[in-house]
Every structure is written in structure tokens, then in C-alpha cells.
Image (cartoon, grey):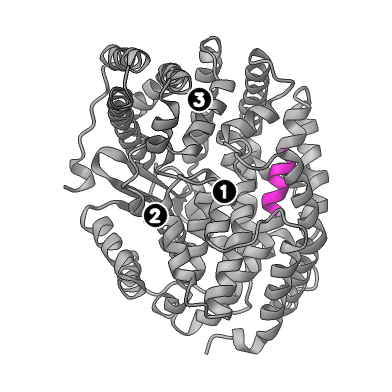
Amino acid sequence: MKFSEFDYQRPNLEEVKNGFLLNIEALKEATTAKAALEAVKAIQTIQKSLETQGNIASIRNSIDTRDAFYEEEMAFWDENTPVIEDWQNDYYKAVLASDFKVQLSEHLSEPFIKMAENSLKVFDAKIIPLLQTENKLSTEYSKLLASAQIDYKGEVYNLAGLAAFQQSTDREERKTVTTLISNYMSENLETLDRIYDDLVKTRHQIALELGFKDFVEVGYLRMNRLDYDRKDVEVYREEVLNYVVPLANDIFKRQANRIGISDMKHYDLPLEYEDGNATPIGTPEEILQAGVKMYHELSTETGEFIDFMVEKNLLDLVTKPGKSGGGYCTYIPDYKAPYIFSNFNGTSGDVDVLTHEAGHAFQVYQSRWVETPEVIWPTYESCEIHSMSMEFIAWPWMELFFGDQTPKYKYSHLASSVTFLPYGVLVDHFQHEVYENPNMTPVERRQTWRELEKQYNPWKDYDGDDYLENGGFWLRQGHIFGSPFYYIDYTLAQVCAFQFWKRTQVDHDDTAWQDYLEICQLGGTQSFLEIVETAHLKSPFGKGNLEAVIASIRDYLDSVSDADLQTK
């Protein structure tokens, strides 16, 4: 069955509620472990059905945000997801209070127990109206950015489509297009400020209603930080400032020399080579077919996976009008189907989708054996290990996509992964400042961003662009609006992925693939630091671990001459 044939039916919430309550009562009254487990499995069936319908609606809405039917369905889910969460929390309470909790944890997994405890800490029925408001504001933000229609050279582009021109070899074009994007954001600044201000105040009120001082702790509990805390993250941010920012600065200095620009501006940063960045060969269909070949040659498991995805049309890859921005992977439980969404725009990012998002999809495909919906995925920072590591594991096949531009791509991929780390940490640091000081005005928030930006991204010269000089860059970062405190996860995972890079591409460690496959198959049955240990990696929080891997990367980048980066 293809994705277009997947059935969508808005659930009857009264029936769903009755099903939850009936089985919760059965769980409470169970006199044997077997009876308790039967009640849990019945609830999981309901959860999977809800997740299936909600995800189908969300995917179809993101494919075309103009579709009135699915726009109305998303309004339904925004309104009722917090209500469903209330019923799920009653279920979590019953599990935690059960006489058979120990036996149930063997089926549910230990991380589930910890996540259930976290969920109860950050939910109360009295905050349902606030959660509904939070959902609506996040949806409003996504729709605003997806609705962008910007005229350029006689064509109309959304933000993702226009971004491809930011890598032009023509400096004036880069500047013009970057200015067009800034202008769109600036024209909508009042609305963006209002949405985020409302989000911050709503989230702060949620924290107060739940008995917390501010939203930071709520955010950490929501993200299920199972074995580290904000102090560990603070130490990690300092390590990034000490060891990664200097290397990133050197990478940009080398880039400026390579493209022959002494006064590097923000619109020059996307262009890494004077004769143009590495771009994939062929049409989107040909790129996908190259991906199919790559995954068949990588392993039996990845070959089976990519055939499943293609045969069932579980990929929507090309940007088009009305399509939501960005890329993601999600999972449709009742069909045991991952789904990949992206916006191909003719840049190397198109190939990154087939490695990054496919890394997510491969992981959940491998962990479909997990019956507990909450742990078919691991926690977010662990999820990103699978995606970012797959990007590097795929390196031996990059000639399929880039031909004689492959050295360019590999250098850029590794270098940009380094320069991303300070930005990712900046996003996290900014959110701590915002939620620890919820009464800041929108102007003060943007000033705070700009001050932090100068620490973490000192190479950014905005060339008099008022919108960006006044701290507006972050307003395009959707995670800040929709997924508070998520972004640091990418950087923690990147440090782990760098270790897989070294093991697979430098050390040629034959055990690396088996370690990767094992952590994919685990799903979320282990916590982040347990997964790191299972994969034989070093923790990002370990003193000196970041310094060591960054030193290896510096050595590799230094070994590549700029002459080697010229397209033959």
C-alpha cells in the first residue's frame, strides 16, 4: 500500500476516551501481571491509532499548507492533543502505581518509566488551555513562514526555494537574495515578535501553574533529559567556545582566501568555492536512484529499508508552492512506515536529506519491533546520532551524487559540521536567557541574541542589514518556536557523529557499522548516555573528549589542500 492510500479518519474522541478509561481501570484492578500487561497493550493499540491519524494529517498538511481540509484537521489536533495527553497521563499514573510495575517495565522499558515520571511532572489538566494556545501559536508561525511568496527574476519562490540562490558565485546575487529574505522577515517582524512573545509568556505561565520557577526545567523534562542536566550543558557550551569556535574561525578565514574576498560578509558565508559549491548531479529522481544504489551497497538492512520507502512512496522530496519549509522524518505506527519530507532545491542539502533524514527513518525501521510507542524512537539527542552519523557513513558513495566535485563536498560537509556546533549551542544558550528572563521585551530578546551571536559566531558581518544587526536572525529558526530546548540535541549528536566519522573514514574500523546498526535496533530502550556507551563512543560531556575529536578534524582539514578542492 502506498502512502496516498493510507486511510485518514478523524478519531471519535468520545470512543477514544472510553477506551483509555476502560483499560486504565482494568490496569488498576489487575490481579496478575498478565492481566496488567493485557491492559497496557490495549492502551498502546489506541495510542498507535491516534499517532497514525495525527501524523498522516500533519504530513499531508505540510505537503500543501493551502489544503483547507488538512488545515482544519490540524486545528482539530492542536485543540485536542492536550486533551489526549491528559488521558495518557492517567495511564502513566496507573503504570507507576501498579503492583506489577517491575514486570510491566520489562515490556515498556526503563526509559519509559522515567519518561512517564517526567510527563506527570509537566502536565496537569488545568494547563490544557495553555497547551492549546501553545500549539496554535506554533502552527501560526509555521504557516506564516510557509506562506512566503517572494518574486525573484520573474519567478515566485518560498523561503526554501530562494535559499538556493544564496550559494550563487555572483556576489551581487547572493547579497540581493539574502536581502530579499531579510526583507520578508522584517516585513513580518511585528507578527513574529508577537507570536514568540505570546509563546514565551504562555510557556512561563505553564511553568508557574506546574509549580516551577521558570520554563527551563519544564523544557528539560519535556525533552526527557534522562541522564544529564543544565549544568552538564553549561560545561559543554564552554567547551564549544574554547575548542570549536577557534577552529570555525580558521575555517571561515580559509574560505575567505579561497573565494578571494577580504571583507567577508554574511551573504558570502554560504559560498565556499570561487567556482561554486558542490551541487548534486542529475534530477531529483536520479538523485533518489543514486540513493537506492548506495543503500543497497552499504548493507542488506539498508537495501531492504530503501526499497520499502520507495515502493510505498514514503518520500516527498521536492520544494513546491504551499509546501511547508524544512525537512523531517516521522513514523506512522499502524503501517509500520517511516516517512521522509524535504525541500530539494538543487544544493548539496538535497543529498544530505537522503543521508540525514534517511538515518532517522532507517533507525525507526530497524526498531519497529518495539511495541511501546514512547520508545520506538530514542530521546531526541540520541535520534540525531543516527541521522548525523549516517551522513558520514555514506561518504564512500558520494561520487554517485557529486562526481568530480566529491572532494569539495566532503571538505564542506565536515567543515560545515564544525561551524554548525557554535550556532547550535548559541540557539540553546539564547533560549536559556529567554526563559530565565520571561519579561524581556521582543527588542531585548533580539539584543540578547546579537550579544550571544558575537561570542559564538564572531565571523558574522551583517554589512549594515538593520534586521540582522538588530538580532533578527533567530526568527527563522523554527525549533525556537515549536520545540524549545531541542536544538542542543543536534550538537550533542554531532560530537558523537564525529566519532563515527573518524572510525569509518579515518580509522576504517570494521566494528563501527555493527555498533551503528545495534543502536538503531535498540530504538529508545536505552537512555542517551547508555546508547553512547553501547556504540563505544565517548560522552560529549566528558572533559577533553570534545578537544580530542576537534583536533582530529583539524588535522584532516589541514591535510586537504585548496588545490584538491578545485573541480577537475
Of tags 3 and 1, which is closer to the observer? Answer: 1
Q: Secondary structure at mark 1?
A: helix
**Crowd around label 2: few <14 · some 14–19 · many ≥20 (10 Å):** many
Residue identified by numbered label 3:
135
Q: What range of the chain is rendered magenta?
A: 423-430
**Crowd around label 1: few <14 · some 14–19 · many ≥20 (10 Å):** many
Disc 3 residue type?
Answer: Asn
Along the viewing direction, whichever of 342 and 266 lies nearer the viewer: 342
Whether residue 425 appears in magenta in the rendering, the answer is yes
State the image coordinates of residue 28 (x, y, percent, origin top left): 37, 14
Along the viewing direction, whichever of 505 and 419 lies nearer the viewer: 505
**Crowd around label 3: few <14 · some 14–19 · many ≥20 (10 Å):** many
Reply above or below: 158 against 137. Answer: below
Residue identified by numbered label 1:
528
Pick out the residue farthest to the front.
32
Query: Which residue is at a point 68% across and 65% down the rendered structure image?
Result: 268
Image position of 566 (left or right of 64): right
Which is more N-terminal, label 3 or label 2?
3
Query: Which residue is at a point 83% across and 44% down the rendered structure image?
Result: 451
State the image coordinates of residue 336 (x, y, percent, origin top left): 27, 45
Reply above or below: 472 against 401. Answer: above
Image position of 50 (left or right of 409): left
Which is more N-terminal, label 1 or label 3?
3
Pick out the residue farthest to the top.
126
Residue identified by numbered label 2:
521
Whether residue 179 appears in magenta in the rendering, the answer is no
